[in-house]
Image (cartoon, rainbow, N blue to C red):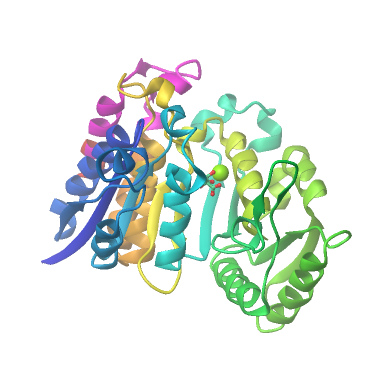
Amino acid sequence: MKTYKIALIKGDGIGPEIIDEAVKVLDAVASCCDIEFSYEEALMGGCAYDITGDPLPQETINISLNSDAVLFGAIGGQKWDSLPREKRPESGLLRFRKELGVYANLRPATVFDELINASSLKPEVVKGVDLMVVRELIGGIYFGEPKGRDENRGWNTMVYTREEIVRIAHQAFKIAMTRSKRVCSIDKANVLDVSQLWREVVTEVAREYPEVELSHMYVDNAAMQLIRDPRQFDVMLTGNIFGDILSDEASMLSGSIGLLPSASVGAKIGVYEPIHGSAPDIAGQGIANPIATILSASMMLRYALGENEAADKIDNAVKRALKDGYRTKDLAQYDAKEVCSTSEMGSIIANYAAK
Ligand code: IPM
Ligand code: MG
């Protein structure tokens, strides 16, 4: 039997509730796939600041680097919004991504047939959507120097090096090879020099993947096309800030931000996390949707551990729970047979996954 070491970072707000459900489901598939998980918890975000004075204690980095993968909930909340920038939960997360070198953030957006009515767009527009945003995660304007502010000016710098563009482009093309072999690279090359370099380098890398069809699109047009005709996209390759924005937009195609998982991968250990935030307004009420985190655990099995059978079991269990009409509160209006709590949803999916 194989044992995997998983670092659990529950974080703030609904983070602990949703991670607990993902663990329930992982343990359910473990027993039938001849694998075992050992978990170690680590602190990040506001809860880490409250206890240690630092949103990212060194111990969290050590525990994470010493694991096979990191499963992460969510961080942040109003309570910590007035702290100096480097003490804020978000700064801890950005430092964490940088320390782990997870430069590629994979954010799939799919529309489940069972939830076709949950999207704010017409069913005929979103039916069958299956795209993947490949977002560069540790460069661009989030990290570029110089940055800062004084009383009258604030400044950040969007920088990409050739090397950074090459490695994220390879990720996107490799993923496209396992899908329908189309990459659309999103930039603002009509205005930004950094985007011009991005476009040139992506075009060069594309020559190594002759089977993949590459197109380029300006980010403003891409934002529009995602709403107008989302099925035209397969892999959307883009930088840090454009990817942040477009992936939130893409999540709405599926009807609830509580459904979408993500994987952040790079040279070392990967981080698997829902794309939604810590939702402090609903924390502790048992109404959060755990599916995004459960599907993140499935991405972890697939990408970090190569346990595809276990991952398939989870994905199928989620589909079956939705098909059978189980809904958390965010989706209660959409063809629900039974509205369930966070932990009921976790148990239903765990039961299906164990079969
Ligand atoms: C995300 C979030 C983060 C980001 C925040 C919390 C720093 O919005 O993961 O998309 O901007 O990357
Ligand atoms: Mg975001």
Number of numbered discs present?
0
Q: Is 36 rendered above or below residue 206?
A: above
Q: Is residue 1 left or right of residue 197?
A: left
The picture places residue 167, in percent across and down from the top left corner, at: 58, 75
The picture places residue 127, in percent across and down from the top left corner, at: 63, 37
The picture places residue 113, in percent across and down from the top left corner, at: 53, 35
Image quadrant where residue 199 sits = bottom right
Figure quadrant of the N terminus: bottom left
Figure quadrant of the C terminus: top left
Q: Residue at x 66, y 46 (%)?
A: 246
Quick one: which residue is furthest to the left in this view? 1
Quick one: which residue is furthest to the right in this view? 190
Q: Residue at x 70, y 44 (%)?
A: 230
Quick one: which residue is furthest to the front in this view? 151
Q: Is residue 55 left or right of residue 116?
A: left
Q: Is 265 rendered above or below residue 340?
A: below
Image quadrant where residue 4 sits = bottom left
Please provide the residue range marked out in magenta. Answer: 321-350
The reply to whether residue 164 is visible in this rendering is yes
Q: Is residue 99 left or right of residue 140?
A: left
